[in-house]
Image: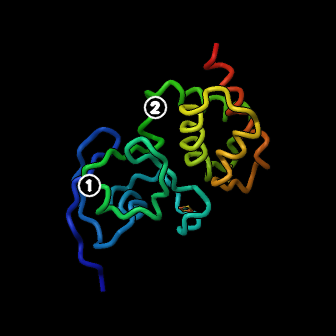
Amino acid sequence: MMAKKVLHSLTLNGEQVDVATPSGATLLETLREDLRVLSSKRGCNQGVCGACTLLVDGKPVRACLTLTARCEGHEIQTVDGMGEDHVMATLQRHMVESGGVQCGFCTGGVLISARELLAEDPMPSREAVKTALSGNVCRCTGYRTIVDAVVGAAEELAQ
Ligand code: FES
Ligand code: FES
């Protein structure tokens, strides 16, 4: 039997969006299945891999652990809605140039976590980058190129 749908009014990437989503849906389910916003990936669906990470009121959260109903009245930002953000654009460029993007499945979540790190610590050490990204699993890169990208972006932004 299909779950009953409930209407929610969300603020997504600066726009008001009304969406009917199953009662009890997570934000990840609502975004991907009802709104077809696919930049937050469904990996573990248990809060472990970080692939679904996005911002709620400017703070990184796991969309797979966040109920859509709890997001009414809060600002939701996905990585594809941050194209105007200079820090994010710089991080994205360094990720591509360093080889930190391979299959790309983890990349959105990594970028959100890295963006948050640079907001708090504009010149992080490699160790600080590794710690900040420890909740983002990448099966492809071995992480070195991702750390290179974040450190390189921080150095460029500091100039
Ligand atoms: S899909 Fe949300 S943490 Fe893995
Ligand atoms: S680039 Fe493939 S999982 Fe990270």
Q: Does the residue labelled 1 lie within 8 Å of ligand 1?
A: no
Q: Residue furthest top?
A: 159
Q: Residue 52: x, y in percent?
A: 51, 56
Above or below — where is 99 with respect to 140? above
Neighbour tally class for label 1: few under 14, some 14-19, many 20 plus, Cα within 10 Å? few
Mark 1 secondary-structure assignment: loop
For the question of whether residue 147 can be seen, the reply is yes
Q: Residue furthest bottom?
A: 1
For the question of whether residue 92 can be seen, the reply is no
Above or below — where is 157 with respect to 99? above
Residue type pointed to by label 2:
Gly
Q: Is mark 2 within 8 Å of ligand 2?
A: no
- Numbered label tally: 2
Above or below — where is 147 with respect to 134? above
Q: Name the residue under label 2.
A: 83
Where is residue 117, by image quadrant? top right
Q: Residue 145: x, y in percent?
A: 76, 39
Q: Residue at x 33, y 56 (%)?
A: 35
Left or right, 106 with respect to 149, comes to left
Q: Mark 1 points at which residue?
A: 72
First in residue order: circle 1 vs circle 2:
1
